[in-house]
Amino acid sequence: MGQLAQATQGQQLQAAGHTAQNGIADMLKHAWPRIQAVMPKHMSSERMYQIALSAINTTPKLAECSPATILSCVMKCSALGLEPSAVDGLGRAYILPYRSKQGMQAQLILGYKGMIALARRSGEIKDISARAVYEGDEFDYSFGLDEHLSHKPAAREHKDGEKPTHVYMVAHFKDGGHYMDVMTFQEVEAIRKRSKAANNGPWVTDYEAMAKKTVIRRAFPYLPVSVEAQSAAASDETSGGYVDQLSFDPIMPADEESARKDVLEVVQDTEPKGLRKAVCKTCGTSIDVAADATLEDVAANMPPCCEKMQLEWAEE
């Protein structure tokens, strides 16, 4: 293929991508009254709209995703009171493209700060934080009757690609109590490997932030947080594999009006398509997860009693 033909094809792909993003933006505007209705009172509707639009426009690969799943993610962000951002490891939530058996779909991924924000919102937690421990740090902890944790970071810069030896979280409650948890690198790696986004996306670009989020997520069943927050944490990262945003090959819907109707139907539906319900037979906890998630994926994020053998799929 000649240079002129390649340049022309590149321009056509770029134009197609812009067209797809413009279509998604139009549908977001059309569905916004329903999305706005689920927002907490403290959120600014105008600010959330602009942030959501920016998050979509800065992730070109979302042009390939089902518009319905994109708007579903925006609605979930709005209901949780979390603002989506670009993939920078510092945001509260991310809307990312995933490949599933149903095709390209958008998935909401909670960030480290999002987990902390949900925990603090209960009003029962005075402070909560997570830290990473690296080789050379002075670090000691113990559990039991004489529980303690001490950490003095080494005065050095970390090497590129260096992974922490441990991550830990500590939550202080307003009644004077506290809860802490520690995960080794091996434990974090076991969780990462169970994620279908194990080798792409934030786990590669922002490993420390994802490790911190992992230890906070594991602590959620023991923290005084809302049922909505528990469900959001449990269903996090249970969708298909992250798609490399560098390989952009936009897919346009054959009928934009049909896509628009599909979006509005999903937004109106309280049980979004592409999800199914997992239930713990011991405690009755139930969460909605991606249709292609396994019980192993679910068990990794459920309360301790919800082991694999005690989980089952709810009847449709």
Image (cartoon, grey):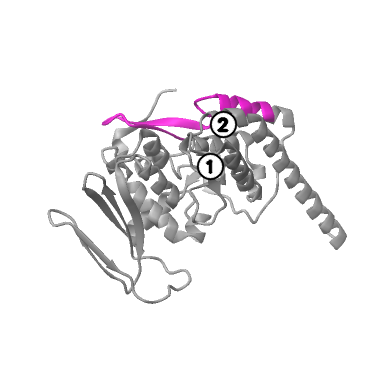
**Point 68% across, 39% down: residue:** 25
Q: Quarter of the image holding residue 256?
A: top right
**Disc number lying in front (1 or 2):** 2
Cα distance in 3D space between marks 1 and 2: 17 Å
Q: Amino acid at mark 1?
A: Gln
Q: Which residue is mark 2?
A: 35
Q: Which mark is residue 107?
A: 1
Query: Looking at the picture, does residue 65 appear above or below residue 192?
Result: above
Horizontal side of 184 relative to 80 (left or right) equals left
Res 33 seen here: yes
Query: Looking at the picture, does residue 190 appear above or below residue 33?
Result: below
Magenta residues span 260-289
Describe the element under mark 1 as helix, strand or loop.
strand
In the rendered image, residue 235 lying in the magenta stretch gets the answer: no
Res 104 seen here: no
Q: Position of residue 304 (x, y in %)?
A: 27, 41
Q: Quarter of the image holding residue 7?
A: bottom right
Q: Amino acid at mark 2?
A: Ile
Could you tell me which quadrant the N terminus lies in?
bottom right
